[in-house]
Image (cartoon, rainbow, N blue to C red):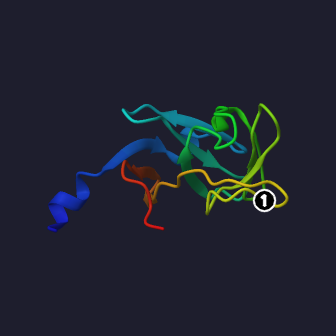
Amino acid sequence: MSAVMAEQTWVEVGPIDSIPRLGARVLKRDGGDIAVFRNAEDEIFALLNRCPHKGGPLSEGIVYGRTVACPLHNLCMDLATGQAKAPDEGCATVFPVRIDGERVLVSLEQAAT
């Protein structure tokens, strides 16, 4: 695959500061929206904006450390892996994130597992 083709899968979300600390922005797309999170350490993560348990909007959840708690029923998801934290079960789809200077870019293709 050429570098040009690989570039076409990345979408700019905006500057890092456009994502609130301990919060998220939503990237609208066909096939399900992507929630782009920023934690207190300014790490950026992206998950499908749908809790694997009951479909709650993860972007509206509470972010702490490298975790988001679903706003519907408090299922806790690891932001880096999408895995539910024990004793919960399930996995949210993860999307690759890239930082270019101050710009946040998200791939529209899910991360390889």
Give the residue at x 44% y 41%: 14
Q: Position of residue 78 (x, y in %)?
A: 70, 58
Image point 17% across, 58% down: which residue? 5
Q: Quadrant of the N terminus?
A: bottom left
Q: Position of residue 53 (x, y in %)?
A: 69, 41
Q: Is residue 47 left or right of residue 13?
A: right
**47 sits left or right of 107 in the view:** right
Please tell me which residue is depicted at 45% across the width and 59% down the height of the picture: 96
From this view, report whether residue 88 is shown above or below residue 20.
below
Element at label 1: loop
Q: Nearer the viewer, residue 102 or 63?
A: 63
Residue 71 in the image, given as x and y percentages of width and height: 77, 33
- Residue 26, given in percent of the width and then of the height, sits at 53, 34
Q: Residue at x 40, y 36 (%)?
A: 31
- Count numbered badges in the picture: 1
User: Tag 1: Cα neighbours inside 10 Å, few (<14), some, or many (≥20)?
Assistant: some
The residue where tag 1 is placed is: 85
Q: Amino acid at mark 1?
A: Lys
- Pick the residue in front: 41 or 36: 36
